[in-house]
Amino acid sequence: MSSYAAFYRQSIDERDAFWAEQARRIDWHTPPQTICDYSNPPFARWFAGGTTNLCHNAVDRHLAARAQQNALVAISTETDTERAYTYAELHAEVQRMAAVLQALGVRQGDRVLLYMPMIAEAAFAMLACARIGAIHSVVFGGFASGSLASRIEDAEPLVVVSADAGSRGGKVVPYKPLLDEAIELSRHKPAAVLMVDRGLAGAAMRAGRDHDWAALRAQHLDAQVPCTWVDATHPSYTLYTSGTTGRPKGVQRDTGGYAVALAASMRHIFQADPGDTYLCTSDIGWVVGHSYIIYGPLIAGMTTIMYEGLPIRPDAGIWWSIVEKYRVTHMFSAPTAVRVLKKQDPAYLSKYKLSSLKALWLAGEPLDEPTAQWIGSALGVPIIDNYWQTETGWPILTLCNGVEPQAARLGSPGKAVFGYNVKLIDEATGAELTAPNQKGVVAIEGPLPPGCLQTVWRDDERFVNTYWKSIPGRLIYSTFDWGIRDADGYYFILGRTDDVINVAGHRLGTREIEECIASHPNVAEVAVVGVADALKGQVALAFAVPKNAAGLEAPEARLRLEGEVMKLVDARLGAVARPARVHFVSALPKTRSGKVLRRALQAVAERRDPGDLTTMEDPAALAQVKALVTE
Ligand code: PRX
């Protein structure tokens, strides 16, 4: 048995001993007595009774040995700024932020919602929350007022931290008007809003509610806010993600399990050492940003780089110039970004000295072979695919323990990661598929390892019913992804089993987009499907039935309505959710019982055979779709 196979087996067969060992990678105020309490499945309580603090492990713990080492470098090609914070400086900034949050009334267990661009203050705010035991909930800055409002309503934050604006491709995107609108829309009203003024857009401040970060920071320059020791099971954050229904789910993460899982991943997945430098190009609004821009690298004592900007601006060499300048050792990105770079002049890759780089990890969407091969030969380092979810917080499938890059199989994110008892399940019968090369649902036998979601925020029932009861006859966690496993244990991910789509690595729920489009006064019915796209992996296509088709015969009129629908999505959900096209049809293809045949729609839009259509009510509806997409 290879050493990884033995390591993996131990993580499953001697679970508690394995994780007790990993738990020594972090500092505990009170060491845990129990490792995994799984007396009430599927709720796993990792390290219950142990007390620790995420911010202590990410910041304070490193002060003795590396106070003067850079902890965080915030680079923005949008504002042409670059600022490095040593661990000592980060420690001071986080305490200032913590003191300000406390002054605004935040106590342990309170929620703080962050709606922020990729600026250092966002990291301060996350760490400050962790420091005082408050639960942060970061909402991606690309979301608009409707998405933000539903998250404010669910998280019920006492304080919202935001900034005047984000910026993308040189275009300033004011945040404050969207935030004000979202608070207006939400039934829950935060007591205070803390605004970071970047001097980009200005912000109308509401007296009594809105506060200026710089002004309050100045009052707390010498703040000393000790870490609050919390139980390992104390929630550290919630992060909203999409599923089958329109209502986003608040994935709730614990403290101790998460810290241990990340520390273990930094060692056994990334082989990271203190002093190494990590560049993760995700956004703090996504799970990858939480785990591998902020917490993971800092827990490991690395320097982490936060980057605001596009991968091709000012030119396609920007990331590689950062790698050269900061001697980046570990890089994490998404296949879409690499496909964008692949279209640019390859000379940008040879222009910089990249000898510091050990490997590039890619996640979030399927990594296609041409992309993997191109970037692998351009960089001359291993390209390591890894598969996971917002729910799990860290990789489920990848290659661990520095296995030789030639061990990678193109198209496969690798094998089950330690701690994850991954199974393939027959969707219809619930039976485990043990023979190689069979297609099934990728599932994980409980308990989920440390670091994974504890529950859905304030909705245990939804946690159980959504994730653990979708497979008949057994309590097992479903990833909602199809997969196969070859004879050597390598998995291949074949796409979602539900209505979630993946646009440029961004996870979107088609139902959420449908609900938004259906609120247009001239839309009677709509179906949104994800369609394969060479650059973004998938794009969303909408097929809408107008309420009043009169006047829509002219192509200009249809274009105008399409434009209105897109604007509506931009305004409510954000441009990330905007469909690539909105096609108007007289009817949607449905079964006789009235269910929209989304899979048939998707197949036809991808010019594939839609398969068995015997249950279809009106074949003309699908014929119309076919004509439209071939147009
Ligand atoms: O469908 C899988 C796809 O992205 C989903 C999770 O997205 P999200 O919650 O945003 O978390 C991303 C964390 C990296 C999965 O259910 N997915 C993620 N990584 C891969 C992937 N599909 C194929 N290959 C991957 N490496």
Image (cartoon, grey):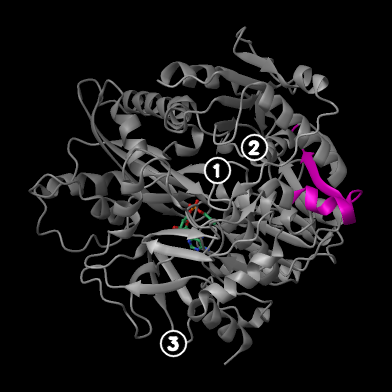
Under mark 1, the amino acid is: Tyr
Left or right: residue 299 versus residue 51 is: right
Q: Quadrant of the C terminus?
A: top left
Whole-angstrom CA distance, mark 3 to mark 1, is 38 Å
Does the magenta run of residues contain 47? Answer: no
Does the magenta run of residues contain 72? Answer: yes
Q: Position of residue 106 (x, y in %)?
A: 61, 27
- Tell me which residue sits at (36%, 29%) in the image: 562
Task: Tell me, for residue 237, which label it has, or none.
Answer: 1
Q: Of 223 and 218, which appears nearest the observer?
A: 223
- Asked if residue 448 can be seen in this view, the reply is no
Under mark 2, the amino acid is: Cys
- Any atom of ligand 1 within 8 Å of the CB at mark 2? no
- Tell me which residue sits at (16%, 63%) in the image: 612
Q: Pick whichever of labels 2 and 3 is earlier in the sequence.
A: 2
**Element marked by disc 2:** helix
Asked if marks 1 and 2 touch (Cβ < 8 Å), the reply is yes
**Element marked by disc 3:** loop
Q: Which segment did they paint magenta? A: 58-78
Q: Which tag is nearer the camera, tag 2 or tag 3?
A: 2
Asked if marks 2 and 3 touch (Cβ < 8 Å), the reply is no
Task: Tell me, for residue 487, which label it has, or none.
Answer: 3
Q: Which residue is mark 2?
A: 129
- Asked if residue 165 can be seen in this view, the reply is yes
Q: Position of residue 180 (x, y in %)?
A: 53, 17
Q: Of 526 and 185, which appears nearest the observer?
A: 185
